[in-house]
Image: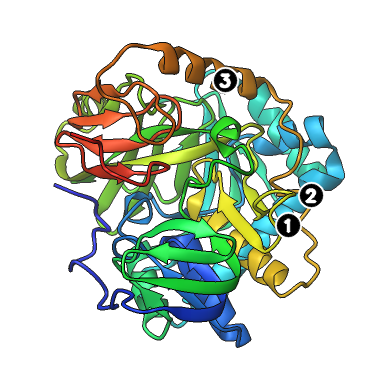
């Protein structure tokens, strides 16, 4: 029982690389962010190729809940407090631009695009909700406080924002990727400057975009300190409820809801990758209590890269790597952030000005409280004795009994029981 969005085939029919080629732009990674970068470069007439280690859309993208929204939890009150009104407004405008671009692209596509209101609710803190509504009013964003929601439990309040969206991510990728220059089953093993080494040939590029979920180059950018990964779980239920919108709890371990057709998608049970959490058992307990007549049709799990300050890293990979760019750290909002990444990076590789570059710059300060937590987790797990070590940076792996995988608490790499790589930043299987 896999994801509701699981591709119906083992690939989209793209060949793997078998020779040395040259291009202006190489995109590494065929998830939503990489595909959108390729699409926009093609629209701009810029020579490019995309290299995907497996098949496009078959990694994190197929495990999304596919919500497209500019309202990422109770973020705007925090952004105003930390960075000021102007930067908070730029973050909002950037994400609204991404939503508008989806609306424009999806107009003629068979991808089940639907506009829905979004709600961020709190179970017990009305004041938090009221502060977020006031913050959005400062940013001239339409939002309202509501308390009566079509959810099976009471809430202290919620922020309602109209005209957000949801869709079918794999149908969308299938529709826009047909004419793109893509190599599937082409893993980039190493970068030498802007030359990518694969198993069957080199790709010599002028510039490179790394869109691999978690960046795999450790020498630059300090992403192994600037991010950790967070795992969460989803059930798709038949005979449940139509909630007529997109819902998420403001609490870090809260639950999310949305419908797809007759199915209700319930998300939650989350935890830092490599640690323990509620997983599907927590969700099933919830369903048994509130939707006892519902039938479980699909179940899946996903993982998200979490940044130090809640803002993605989109832009130059590091100050010391010209012609190398990155899109990562989407903080559970991968669909909107993927479109935003493509918009920003396609401007940057063409040396165009973009109004959002500073807000999302990967070189912004790392002096945030989460940095100490990430460093502590890394030190503890590096010093933990274990026969199973992550090939990324050597951390002790933890057994995940729910999913039967070996997971890295430091940076989130995951492996099958037999050692086969599932999730990066590791780039190879466990040694036997």
Alpha carbons under labels 2 and 3: distance apart: 31 Å
Q: Which residue is mark 2?
A: 89
**Precedes in sequence: disc 2 or disc 3:** 2
Q: Are marks 2 and 3 in contact (CB under 8 Å)?
A: no
- Report the front residue among 29 and 116: 29
Residue pictured at 48% horizontal, 64% vertical: 196
- Report the front residue among 1 and 314: 314
Q: Measured along the vertical axis of the image, is residue 19 above or below residue 32?
A: below
The circle drawn on residue 219 is: none
Q: Are marks 1 and 3 in contact (CB under 8 Å)?
A: no
Quarter of the image for the C terminus: give it: top left
Q: Secondary structure at mark 2?
A: helix
Q: Which residue is mark 1?
A: 93
Q: Position of residue 91 (x, y in %)?
A: 72, 50
Left-right relation of 348 to 375 = right
The circle drawn on residue 375 is: 3
Mark 3, residues whose alpha carbon is within 10 Å: few (<14), some, or many (≥20)? some
Q: Secondary structure at mark 1?
A: helix
Alpha carbons under labels 1 and 3: distance apart: 33 Å
Q: Measured along the vertical axis of the image, is residue 383 above or below residue 21?
A: above
Residue pictured at 64% horizontal, 52% vertical: 317
Q: Position of residue 126 (x, y in %)?
A: 62, 22
Mark 1, residues whose alpha carbon is within 10 Å: few (<14), some, or many (≥20)? some
- Report the front residue among 213 and 199: 199
The picture quadrant where one finds residue 102 is bottom right
Alpha carbons under labels 2 and 1: distance apart: 6 Å
**Precedes in sequence: disc 1 or disc 3:** 1
């Amino acid at each position: 029982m896999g994801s509701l969005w699981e591709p119906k085939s083992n690939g989209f029919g793209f060949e793997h690389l078998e020779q040395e080629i040259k291009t202006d732009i190489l995109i590494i990674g065929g998830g939503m962010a990489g595909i959108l970068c390729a699409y926009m470069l093609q629209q701009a007439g810029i020579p490019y190729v995309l290299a995907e280690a497996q098949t496009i859309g078959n990694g994190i993208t197929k495990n999304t809940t596919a919500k497209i929204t500019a309202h990422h939890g109770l973020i705007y009150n925090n952004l105003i407090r930390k960075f000021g009104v102007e930067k908070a407004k730029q973050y909002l405008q950037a994400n609204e631009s991404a939503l508008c671009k989806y609306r424009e692209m999806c107009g003629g596509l068979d991808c089940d695009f639907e506009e829905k209101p979004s709600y961020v609710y709190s179970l017990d803190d009305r004041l938090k909700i009221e502060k977020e509504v006031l913050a959005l009013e400062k940013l001239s964003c339409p939002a309202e406080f509501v308390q009566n929601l079509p959810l099976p439990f009471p809430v202290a309040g919620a922020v309602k924002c109209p005209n957000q969206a949801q869709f079918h991510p794999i149908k969308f990728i299938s529709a826009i990727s047909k004419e793109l220059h893509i190599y599937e089953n082409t893993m980039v093993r190493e970068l030498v400057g802007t030359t990518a080494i694969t198993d069957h040939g080199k790709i010599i590029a002028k510039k490179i975009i790394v869109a691999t979920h978690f960046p795999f180059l450790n020498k630059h950018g300090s992403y192994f300190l600037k991010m950790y990964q967070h795992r969460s779980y989803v059930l798709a239920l038949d005979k449940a409820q139509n909630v007529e919108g997109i819902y998420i709890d403001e609490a870090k371990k809260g639950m999310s809801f949305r419908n797809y057709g007759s199915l209700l998608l319930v998300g939650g049970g989350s935890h830092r990758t490599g640690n323990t959490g509620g997983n599907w058992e927590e969700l099933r307990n919830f369903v048994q209590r509130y939707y006892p007549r519902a039938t479980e049709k699909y179940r899946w799990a996903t993982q998200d890269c979490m940044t130090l300050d809640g803002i993605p890293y989109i832009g130059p990979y590091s100050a010391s790597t010209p012609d190398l760019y990155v899109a990562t750290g989407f903080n559970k909002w991968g669909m909107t952030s993927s479109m935003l990444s493509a918009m920003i990076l396609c401007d940057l590789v063409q040396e165009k000005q973009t109004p959002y570059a500073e807000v999302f710059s990967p070189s912004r300060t790392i002096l945030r409280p989460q940095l100490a937590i990430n460093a502590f987790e890394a030190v503890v797990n590096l010093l933990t004795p274990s026969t199973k070590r992550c090939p990324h940076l050597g951390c002790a792996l933890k057994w995940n009994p729910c999913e039967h995988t070996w997971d890295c608490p430091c940076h989130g790499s995951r492996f099958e029981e037999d050692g086969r790589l599932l999730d990066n930043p590791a780039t190879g299987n466990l040694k036997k």
